Amino acid sequence: EVRLEESGGGLVQAGGSLRLSCAASGFTFDDYAIAWFRQAPEKEREGVSGISHSDGSTYYADSVKGRFTVSSDNAKMTVYLQMNSLKPEDTAVYYCAAHLRGGRSLIRAAQATGVMYHDMDYWGKGTLVTVSE
C-alpha cells in the first residue's frame, strides 16, 4: 500500500521558517517524483515544488522561488520542504504527492512550463501551515 504522510506544519510568524516532511512508503519505482502542493481557502490548488528521485532535479513555483528548498533523503524515502521567509500568503494546507512513473519528465515539464502537473498518483492528507502577520 502506497502511503504519503506529511508532518511539520504549524503556526509561525511572518519571516519565520518551517520544514515540512513527506514520508513515503509502499513502492519501489526508481523514476518517481514527489511534489508539494498547497491550497488556501477559496483558492485553487498550487504546485509549489517537486523533486525527481532519479536525478534530483527540482522545480519551484515563482511564488516560492528563493525562499523554499526541496530535498530528499532517498534512504528514508522522505522528502523535505524547507520554507524560509514565510509570508501570510503562504498560509495553506500543504500536500505531498507522488508521481510513480516518469518522475524526471514530470519535473522537466514543470520547469519548462512553470506549472506542476496535478494528476499525481497518490496524495497525502496534508498539513496546515499558518503564517501570522
Image: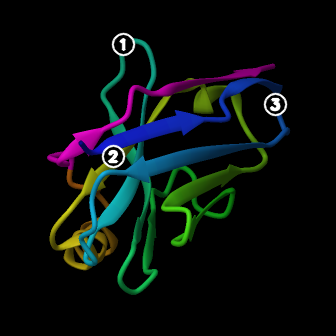
Q: Locate the C terminus by quadrant.
A: top right
Dot 1 alpha-carbon crowd within 10 angstroms: few under 14, some 14 to 19, many 20 or more? few
**Circle 3 crowding by C-alpha within 10 Å: few under 14, some 14–19, many from 20:** some
Q: How far across and how far down the image is residue 34, in percent?
A: 38, 58
Residue beneath disc 3: 14
Circle 2 residues within 10 Å: few <14, some 14–19, many ≥20:
many
In the picture as drawn, the residue positioned furthest to the top comes out as 42
Q: Write the residue at 60% across / 53% down.
A: 81
Say which amino acid is labelled 3.
Answer: Ala
Q: Nearer the viewer, mark 3 or mark 2?
A: 2
Point out residue 107 in the picture as x, y percentages from the top left corner: 31, 71
Quick one: label 3 or label 2, which is nearer the N terminus?
3
Check disc 1 and report its element: helix, strand or loop. loop
* Residue at the (19%, 48%) spot, across then down: 120
Residue segment shown in magenta: 118-133
From the image, tell me which residue sits under label 1: 42
Would you say the residues marked 1 and 2 are in contact, meaning their CB atoms lie under 8 Å apart?
A: no
